[in-house]
């Protein structure tokens, strides 16, 4: 198995360096060698090594001094010292100075493998910890919920009210309206915020997988269950479980879920020990659960158990006043993440966005802005940067004159008011285009 | 000259069937013609009196310089206990992505661990070590599939746990190595 862990071997004996080099290369690590401390420090300064395996007794600077210098500029480096029996005391000193471990030469092959595996595990845990910390910061950041419309103000008020309680919540709304963000906002503002928010995308998992995912499984419960595994309910102890696309779960899972919600206990797949977990449940769906209850595809008792509070997120087309503020928010977000200067959006492009009906809701708008920043000229988002392929006629209640005016305006902007190219695209001659510009009192924003 | 075959260099007296059987099995594993030749050097200079073992690094060099000419891959098969400076013992070692390897039967014998001898088991273990080391010469690294022959093994029990063949991933990497060499 190739790993991304890099190891630097520091030893003045060539045979030791070669043997260790071969040993680690065969294990799939990235390996480099240095014959003395000076060479090692040069290599460490110019490139990152995860593990440094160093002899203590070396001519010139010894391993202990080298270790102190490494720690001075890379405190996260894992240093393992190698020593002969006679120098165990110095190895102990190295441990006191922060070395990860020491090993006496010659090593038992198993000891060496274990040592490196432990160090690799420590690195992986450290990276995981870092990722999770960042994730928590992201989860707590609810700035992504943007909007001043009455609809969104109502939603945010509901979030605020429901967050402090322990009630189950169903969030409804069309695809792309930001149901998961609302769930995160509820969790982040609740007393459970210091415990995990565990998300399960029910629609992405088969019935068996979902069962194992939610309840966990015991080793040997099914083919491939090589270890005991905690389920999401167990992981969420003290926190919140967010079940996305709840309408997709099978009847069998609905019964299981109801039982768990009522007793807050469950058993792992293949196990018989009852496990207790204290979690709050938030569900989301873009389906009409009430209708599903009526046609028998969703259990009524589960519906009422989950639907203590219902938060309905309005689609973007019903809160068009949020579009400008969202557009500016996404421009700022993506310009920052792409390390670019803040750009603007021209009036025609903004107007077109406000007219658009957004079947993909906020997600579609966000993707549109991201794309426009990538493909645009880097100064402002123009109409031609937006992937709006909708039919103007079917989306509009405008008169024929209004439609013609808008279409000509759009074409002129697309070609930067180049009359010849615009006329060619419109399949009219230049004189006709001038007449239309005059008729509709169109003017270039640059003039 | 095109180098095609694999050479097994046999040191000391092995159990009767070993070299021939091993030649057939190595041929089956790598699809290359296998030649068995005796180790004709004196092994005593490679003995380390302090460790009471034989220096594997020097033996690997010897096999490489004296026996590998004309072969695609060469592996020395030893009766003696091998060590490298950093490790207390080894079952075998090879030049990663190179042409030469060595393997020892010494620590594979049940008798080393106070158990009755088992020739069949010994052969199985030895076959796995030889194929494993040859795998390294083809650029394969240690594999974490429990039954793959490229899984690393520190103890004979580890060797007993795995098969003498490659997992799908290693087989495909071996195939690529063959294609690159051909």
Image (cartoon, rainbow, N blue to C red):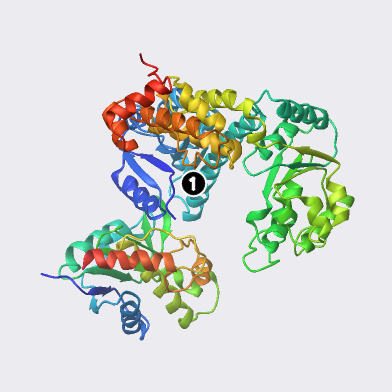
From the viewer's perspective, tell me whether residue A43 is left or right of residue A385: left
List x then y, in percent, for residue A46. Answer: 33, 29
Which residue extends farthest bottom? B16
Q: Is residue A336 above or below residue A91?
A: above
Q: Is residue A403 above or below residue B104?
A: above
Residue at 76% x, 48% y: name it: A234
Image quadrant for the N terminus of chain A?
Answer: bottom left
Chain of residue at mark 1 = A
Q: Nearer the viewer, residue A215 or B129?
A: A215
Task: Identify the secondary structure beneath mark 1.
Answer: helix
Residue that numbered label 1 is attached to: A116
Would you identify the image quadrant in which residue A147 lies? top right
Would you identify the image quadrant in which residue A139 lies? top right
From the viewer's perspective, tell me whether residue B78 is left or right of residue B153: left
Q: Is residue A97 above or below residue A175?
A: above
List x then y, in percent, for residue A208. Answer: 69, 63
Residue at 28% x, 29% y: name it: A430
- Does the rendering let one see residue B68? yes
| Count of marks overlaid on the render | 1
Quick one: label 1, few (<14), some, or many (20+) residues within 10 Å?
Answer: some
From the viewer's perspective, tell me whether residue A225 is left or right of residue A53: right
Q: Nearer the viewer, residue A273 or A100?
A: A273
List x then y, in percent, for residue A231. Answer: 72, 52
From the viewer's perspective, tell me whether residue A437 is left or right of residue A80: left
Q: Nearer the viewer, residue A35 or A397?
A: A397
Image quadrant for the C terminus of chain A?
Answer: top left
Which residue extends farthest top? A447
- Does the rendering let one see residue B133? no
List x then y, in percent, for residue A271. Answer: 78, 62
């Amino acid at each position: 198995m190739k790993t991304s862990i890099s190891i630097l071997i520091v030893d003045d004996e060539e045979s030791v360096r070669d043997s260790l080099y071969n040993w680690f290369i065969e294990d799939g690590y990235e390996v480099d060698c240095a014959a003395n401390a000076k060479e090692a420090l040069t290599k460490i300064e110019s490139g990152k090594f995860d593990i440094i395996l160093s002899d203590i007794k070396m001519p010139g600077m010894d391993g202990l001094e080298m270790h102190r210098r490494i720690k001075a500029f890379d405190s996260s480096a894992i240093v393992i010292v190698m020593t002969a029996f006679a120098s165990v005391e110095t190895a102990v000193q190295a441990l006191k100075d922060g070395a990860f471990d020491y090993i006496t030469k010659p090593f038992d092959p198993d000891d060496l493998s274990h040592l490196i595996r432990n160090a690799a595990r420590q690195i992986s845990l450290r990276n995981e910890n870092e990722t999770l910390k960042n994730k928590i910061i992201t989860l707590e950041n609810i700035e992504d919920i943007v909007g001043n419309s009455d609809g969104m103000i109502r939603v945010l008020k509901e979030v605020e009210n429901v967050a402090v309680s322990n009630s189950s919540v169903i969030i409804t709304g069309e695809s792309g309206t930001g149901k998961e963000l609302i769930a995160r906002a509820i969790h982040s503002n609740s007393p459970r915020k210091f415990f995990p928010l565990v998300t399960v995308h029910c629609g992405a998992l088969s019935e068996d997988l979902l069962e194992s995912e939610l309840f966990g499984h015991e080793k040997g419960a099914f083919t491939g269950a090589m270890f005991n595994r905690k389920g999401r309910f167990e992981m969420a102890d003290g926190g919140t479980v967010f079940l996305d696309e709840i309408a997709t779960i099978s009847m069998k899972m609905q019964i299981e879920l109801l039982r768990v919600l009522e007793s807050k206990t469950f058993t792992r797949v293949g196990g018989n020990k009852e496990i207790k977990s204290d979690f709050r449940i938030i569900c989301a769906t873009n389906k009409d659960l009430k209708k599903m209850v009526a046609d028998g595809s969703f259990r009524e008792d589960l519906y009422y158990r989950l639907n203590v509070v219902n938060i309905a997120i309005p689609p973007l087309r019903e809160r068009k006043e949020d579009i400008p503020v969202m557009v500016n928010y996404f421009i700022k977000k993506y310009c920052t993440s792409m390390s670019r200067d803040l750009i603007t959006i021209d009036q025609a492009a903004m107007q077109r966005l406000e007219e658009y009906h957004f079947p993909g809701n906020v997600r579609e708008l966000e993707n549109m802005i991201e794309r426009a920043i990538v493909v645009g000229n880097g100064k402002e988002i123009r109409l031609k940067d937006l992937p709006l392929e909708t039919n103007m006629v079917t989306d509009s209640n405008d008169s024929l004159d209004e439609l013609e005016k808008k279409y000509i305006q759009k074409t002129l902007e697309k070609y930067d008011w180049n009359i010849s190219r615009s006329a060619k695209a419109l399949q009219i001659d230049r004189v006709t285009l001038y007449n239309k510009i005059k008729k509709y009192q169109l003017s270039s924003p640059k003039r | 000259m095109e180098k095609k075959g694999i050479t097994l260099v046999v040191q000391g007296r092995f159990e009767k069937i070993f070299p021939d059987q091993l030649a057939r099995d190595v041929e089956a594993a790598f699809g290359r013609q296998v030649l068995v030749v005796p180790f004709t050097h004196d092994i005593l200079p490679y003995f380390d009196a302090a460790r009471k073992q034989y220096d594997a690094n020097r033996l690997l060099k010897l096999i490489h310089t004296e026996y590998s000419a004309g072969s695609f891959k060469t592996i020395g098969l030893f009766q003696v206990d091998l060590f490298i400076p950093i490790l207390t013992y080894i079952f075998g070692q090879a030049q990663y992505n190179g042409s030469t390897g060595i393997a020892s039967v010494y620590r594979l014998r049940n008798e080393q661990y106070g158990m009755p001898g088992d020739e069949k088991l010994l052969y199985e273990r030895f076959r796995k070590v030889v194929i494993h080391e040859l795998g390294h010469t083809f650029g394969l690294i240690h594999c974490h599939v429990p039954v793959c022959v490229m899984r690393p093994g520190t103890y004979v029990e580890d060797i007993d746990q795995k098969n003498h063949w490659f997992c799908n991933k290693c087989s495909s990497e071996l195939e690529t190595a063959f294609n690159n060499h051909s």
